[in-house]
Amino acid sequence: MYTPAPTERELEASGLTLEDLAGDAVEVWPENLLTYKVFADLQTQWNVGMGGPIGLNYLTLFAKLDRLGLAGEQADDMEDDIRAMEHEALKVMNERSEV
C-alpha cells in the first residue's frame, strides 16, 4: 500500500525535518510490523509541553489496542514495545531541540 511522504509541516509537528528522513531505508522485521504500524498511527498523538514533546497520549494507544483486539499479554507486550520506541523518539527529538 502506498503512503505518501509526510509534508514539511507534518514533520515539523513531530519535531522532524525532511533531512531527518534522508538516507537509506530501514527494514522492519515481520514480527515488528504491527508495532511499527501502531507507532506510526500515533504520530499525531504526542503530548507537548513548553519544551516540546513529552510523551505519547496513552489513551489513544489503549483505544488502538482495543480496536485491534489485543488484550492481556499481547497488549502488554505491544505497550512495552511502543514505550521503547517512544523513549528513543523523545531522545532524538530532544537532541534536535538542544541544538
Image (spheres, grey):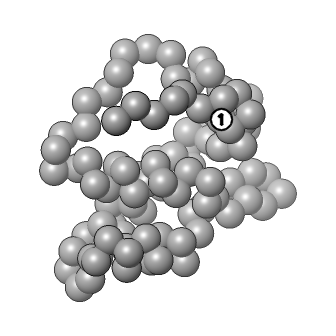
Q: Return the x and y of residue 8 as percentages of the image width and height.
A: 70, 27
Callout 1 amino acid: Leu
Q: Please give the name of the residue rendered at 62% of the width and 54% of the height, measured from the top-left corner.
A: 44
84 or 14: nearer the eye?
14
Q: Residue at x 54, y 77 (%)?
A: 59
The quadrant holding residue 94 is: top right
Reading the image, the residue beneath label 1 is 11
Q: Nearer the viewer, residue 94 or 38?
A: 38
* 32 to 12, vertically: above or below: below
Q: Return the x and y of residue 51 as percentages of the image width and height.
A: 79, 52
* Picture quadrant of residue 17: top right
Q: Is residue 82 left or right of residue 91?
A: left
Quadrant including the N terminus: top left
Numbered disc 1: secondary structure: helix
Q: In percent of the image, x 73 and y 59: which residue is there?
A: 48
Residue 84: tell me if it is visible: no
Quarter of the view holding residue 74: bottom left
- Residue at x 59% of width, y 69% of height: 57
Q: Position of residue 83 (x, y in %)?
A: 42, 62
User: Does residue 69 appear in the picture of this structure?
Assistant: yes
